[in-house]
Structures are given as structure tokens and as C-alpha cells.
Image: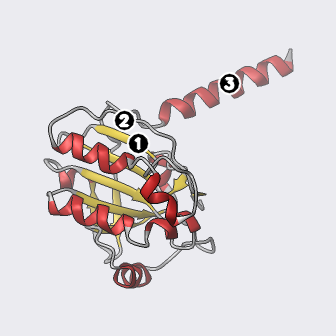
Amino acid sequence: MRLAALLSAAALLLSGAADAAPKVGSPAPAFSATDSAGQAVTLSDYRGQFVVLEWTNDGCPFVQKHYQGNMQALQKDATAQGAAWLSVISSAPGKQGHVSGAEADALTRQRGAAPSKVLLDPAGTLGRLYDAKTTPHLFIVDPQGTLIYAGGIDSIASADVDDIARAKPYVKIALAEAMGGKPVSEPVTKPYGCSVKY
């Protein structure tokens, strides 16, 4: 009897956790975070723009794969079209990928990256709000604040840079469709990479 009650309670907890994950087609979870310059950033700051949220960790080989040019190209293309690109670092202090604001800015310069802002999330609050699982893990929010994409950067779950050319570029396609006024054809895909270091 007691075991049944415990299992029932566990099932309720698990279902509640699943319900808490953001859902594509619903309003994107509102947040306030601090950027690498120490400034407060909210999702509502970007109302009227497309917003890309990219979870990143410079020590992760899957992130390193895409930062050999692919991620930078996506960032530059998106921001050139008026989107905001927010790179999020949810690595906890002492964990792989944890950086200070100055270190995050140095990484951006060294890699030739082009995010609109780098958000520091050492407590993992923003990461858990979006249920970010991997680095990279990407989300797209439309100008009305609706979550329209959640998932992987592309279709080949490897750390090999040579696979980028052969992969289906999910995020690139989703952005092009959405910015062209079309529905996103694959709004949910499976993210891959290193686990977020909460």
C-alpha cells in the first residue's frame, strides 16, 4: 500500500515536471537574466523580434564542432535579418563551461561569434525554465512571444565538423521558414550534445 502511494506521488511529480517544460506553440517562458556586461535582459526586451536562445558551453566538443564557423554563420545571418540571438551559459561554478562575464566576452571575440548578448545563468534558473538539456540546445521565439522551435541545431548527432555539410540544418530551416511568414515544418527536434552542467 505504501509503495503504491509512493509510486503515485512520484508519477504526479514527474507529470508536473513534464508539464513545466515549455511547449512549442505556447507563449515562451518569460525571464530576466544578466548578460556578460552585468546588465539585466528580459525576453520582453525583444518583443516584436525573433529571438534565438542557444545553450552553449565552450568546453563541449559538440559546441566546438559548430563554433568552427557554423554557429557564427547562423548568428550573423539571423541578426542581419533583425533577430536577437541570445547565447546562454548555464554551467554552474566549478563545472565545465562556467565563465565570468569578461571570459564570456573574450570567448565571443576569440571565436568571431556574433550573438546579440551572452546570458550568464550559473544557478541554472533560465536553463531549467526552458528545460535545456544539451549544449547546444536551441529555441526560437517569434515576434509575438510564442515558442515556435525547440531542439537540435541539425540532424547528425556527432562532434565531427565534417558532418555539418551532410546534416539537415534544423535551426537554419526553421528561421528561414518563420521569417518568410511560413509555419515551421519541424518545430520540435531532438537536441544532442553534452549535458548542461547544472
Structural distance between the alpha carbons of marks 3 and 2: 27 Å
Quadrant for residue 97, please give it: bottom right
Position of 33 with respect to 175 (left or right) is: right
Quick one: SS at disc 2? loop
Point out the tag, 3 or 2, that comes first from the N-terminus.
3
Which residue is at a point 56% across and 34% down the rendered structure image? 17
Q: Position of residue 79 (x, y in %)?
A: 20, 62
Task: Assess whether mark 3 and mark 1 are in contact (beta carbons under 8 angstroms).
Answer: no
Point out the tag, 1 or 3, that comes first from the N-terminus.
3
Quick one: SS at disc 3? helix
Residue 89 appearing in the image: yes
Point out the image quarter for the N terminus.
top right
Say few, some or many: other residues with alpha carbon within 10 Å of mark 2 (under 14 / 14 to 19 / 20 or more).
Answer: some
Which residue is most to the top? 1
Structural distance between the alpha carbons of marks 2 and 1: 6 Å
Position of 156 with respect to 138 (left or right) is: right
- Residue identifier under label 3: 11
Q: Position of residue 89 (x, y in %)?
A: 46, 65
- Residue identifier under label 1: 150
Which residue is at a point 37% across and 35% down the rendered structure image? 187
Point out the image quarter for the C terminus.
bottom right
Which one is in front, 148 or 65?
Answer: 65
- Residue identifier under label 2: 187
Say few, some or many: other residues with alpha carbon within 10 Å of mark 1 (under 14 / 14 to 19 / 20 or more).
Answer: many
Task: Assess whether mark 1 and mark 2 are in contact (beta carbons under 8 angstroms).
Answer: yes
Q: Position of residue 176 (x, y in %)?
A: 23, 46
Structural distance between the alpha carbons of marks 1 and 3: 25 Å
Kind of residue at badge 2 = Pro
Kind of residue at badge 1 = Ala
Q: Position of residue 13 (x, y in %)?
A: 63, 30
